[in-house]
Amino acid sequence: MQYCASTNFMGQQDQMSSTILHAPRGVANGRSPAARRKGPRPAAARKAAPPPAPTLEAEGDAAKHPFLVALGERVRALRSRRGITRKALAASAEVSERHLANLEYGLGNASILILLQVAQALQCSLAELIGDVTTGSPEWLLLRELLEGRDEATLRRVRVSVGELLGTGGGNVARSSRVALIGLRGAGKSTLGQKLADDLGFPFIELSRHIEQFAGCTINEIQALYGQNAYRRYERRALEEAIQTYPEAIIATPGGVVSDPATFNLLLAHCTTVWLHADPEDHMKRVIAQGDMRPMGGHAASKEAMEDLKSILAGRAAFYSKAEFKLDTSAQPLEATQAALRDLVRQALRLPV
């Protein structure tokens, strides 16, 4: 079974920074030009030289600090959620791919452990020591303390209540007739969304096309010319206009819409959401069927692309699962899947089945 979809599962980027220490100018391998002219070091001096920095091959799991391991896992999770390869992130962050790999495998710059020790001594979080947005005022700190350690169901109730209090939308008690289909590229959002819109008599909105209309160029050109932040601004603007313009609609969203919390909050608050998901193999087949040959660069490249796709799915699944409904588009043929989606949405909107 093959469906078409429009959003990119590749190329989503994020920003991160890293501190890399270099030897002073004119010093190579720890020796000045004058020292090198005097000839090789004595044997004793050579033996006293400091050992090289640990690498993935040299460092065993037992030597890894749990905090650095957790930090590496968070870096990998963020990278997967945004759909970016390690090589692309290393280039964007202007660090070596090996340095980034060390960070992801728990061999990051150990100096961050000093900050952790200071935070523990001060009995505060590392975030409070560094100074993120939630440390900006006493109210922020008190809110953090109230929410810390709560389960997902409780946090969701708090988010809905806050949305209702601030007037930004909450629990969608009166279910919206704007139906947003979310999921990775190749899930079937375009094909199934158009058929669902035809069945209900609703407008069909391909949000990616609206983004391109706002920018006056393609999505790839937006990202290449203006960067990921500009793309996210266009994405949110397109969603805001769709919400304001269409009280009833079927909206096919880009796969990375869950990467921006503000845009995803807007979607959850003003739309009935359905997560269309499929097996990774079906995602890949459907993308290739559209003529997108990027995953196909020989056997090795294809295998690497599949691993990247699985990583992106794993990184975004927790966010996709915030949708009100979920439908497996790999479980049945196209006609049966379309009928299942039609029945699901009609029942949700209390329309005749």
Image (spheres, grey):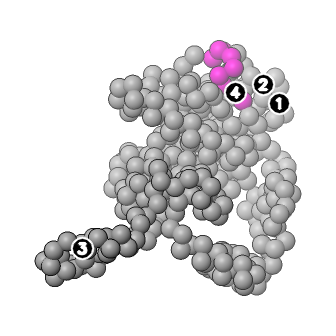
Using the numbered discs, state the Cα–Cα distance from disc 2 to disc 4 in whole angstroms. 14 Å
> Label 4 is placed on what type of residue?
Asp
- For discs 4 and 3, the disc positioned in front in the rendered view: 3
Mark 3 or mark 2: whose residue is earlier in sequence: 3
Residue at 46% over, 42% down:
10
Above or below 52: residue 353: above
Using the numbered discs, state the Cα–Cα distance from disc 1 to disc 2 in whole angstroms. 6 Å
- Dividing the picture into quadrants, the one containing residue 114 is bottom right
Classify residue 152 as left or right of residue 134. Answer: right
Residue 328 is tagged as 4
Residue 316 is tagged as none
Q: Is mark 4 on a helix, strand or loop?
A: strand
- Dividing the picture into quadrants, the one containing residue 151 is bottom right
Asked if residue 312 can be seen in this view, the reply is yes
Residue at 60% over, 59% down:
64
Q: Do the residues labelled 1 and 2 touch (CB within 8 Å)?
A: yes
Q: Do the residues labelled 2 and 4 touch (CB within 8 Å)?
A: no
Q: Which of 158 and 97 is in front in this view?
A: 97
Give the residue at mark 2. 343
Range covered by the magenta-colored residues: 327-335
> Label 2 is placed on what type of residue?
Asp
Asked if residue 248 can be seen in this view, the reply is no
The quadrant the N terminus occupies is: top right
Q: Where is residue 124 in the image (x, y as percent from the top left)?
A: 73, 80
Using the numbered discs, state the Cα–Cα distance from disc 3 to disc 2 in whole angstroms. 79 Å
> Label 1 is placed on what type of residue?
Gln
Q: Position of residue 255 (x, y in %)?
A: 56, 42
Residue 347 is tagged as 1
